Amino acid sequence: QKEVEQNSGPLSVPEGAIASLNCTYSDRVSQSFFWYRQYSGKSPELIMSIYSNGDKEDGRFTAQLNKASQYVSLLIRDSQPSDSATYLCAVNWGTSYDKVIFGPGTSLSVIP
Amino acid sequence: DTGVSQDPRHKITKRGQNVTFRCDPISEHNRLYWYRQTLGQGPEFLTYFQNEAQLEKSRLLSDRFSAERPKGSFSTLEIQRTEQGDSAMYLCASSLVKGITDTQYFGPGTRLTVL
């Protein structure tokens, strides 16, 4: 069974701290990895995509990928209350780059 | 606004009725996905299209669900004989597949309530 797992949370961090969100996946052939943010009652919005091992930075966000460990993470620096949302990890499944599978999401709360 | 639109945004129906949702993807995107999401869960894959071809349908999807994408443009998702368990947010996403990239952009969703 191919799966994407995330800590359900909720994860609470104080404003200005670093929030660390983790995701593991079960299929070694997965090639594409995505982080989405979803505010309550809204649809997911793309934050970052990552395809290669290592770090990818975009503003306050850093995605980290380790394919050997089947692990992808998202770091949010200088967390703001507006970052409070559910963060979804998504993995593109299979060698033919078929459908994307989403994890259950991690709820983040940034405390002012 | 990602450029993906869905209609209607909300639908309330009685059990046993049929409902149809529409999704208009970003115009140059060749792939279109349908997901279902319930409270506290991630989006659950239902089906997807590459242009007009339906490539996969989730085994979780009963025969009451059908989707089409005529001419590879907009798509419709129909649910026949709705049940209370069908109450959920139905999300559409589109992407332009290039090599290994399949970055999806979501529409605002259609929230279905079955009474």
Image (spheres, helix red, strand yellow):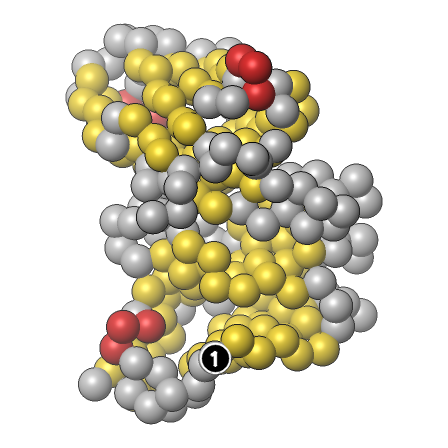
Identify which residue is drawn at 65% across, 28% down. Answer: B50
Q: Amino acid at mark 1?
A: Gly
Residue at left offset 57%, top offset 21%: B72
Measured as percent of width and height from the top left, residue B42 is found at 45, 49
Residue A61 shown left or right of residue A99 in the figure: left
User: Is residue B114 left or right of A96 when viewed as pictured?
Assistant: left
Q: Which percent across, then down, holds residue B29?
A: 57, 36
Identify the chain of the residue marked 1, using the numbered disc in the image. A
Residue B105, percent from left and from top:
48, 46
Q: Quadrant of the N terminus of chain A?
A: top right
Mark 1 Cα-neighbour bin, 10 Å: few <14, some 14–19, many ≥20: few
Image height check: is A39 above or below A10? Answer: above
Q: Reply above or below: B36 against B99.
A: above
| Horizontal relation, residue B103 to residue A52: left or right | left
From the viewer's side, name the closer residue of B42 and B22: B22
Question: Which residue is farthest bottom?
Answer: A16
Q: Secondary structure at mark 1?
A: loop
Q: Residue at point 43% right, 43% down?
A: B106
Q: Could one spot residue B41 in this view of the protein?
A: no
Question: Can you say whether B39 is above or below A67 in the image?
Answer: above
Viewed as shown, does residue A73 lie left or right of A108?
Answer: right
Q: Which residue is mark 1?
A: A59
Quarter of the image where the C terminus of chain A is located: bottom left
Q: Tell me if I can see residue B79 in this picture.
A: yes
Q: Residue at x 63, y 69 (%)?
A: A72
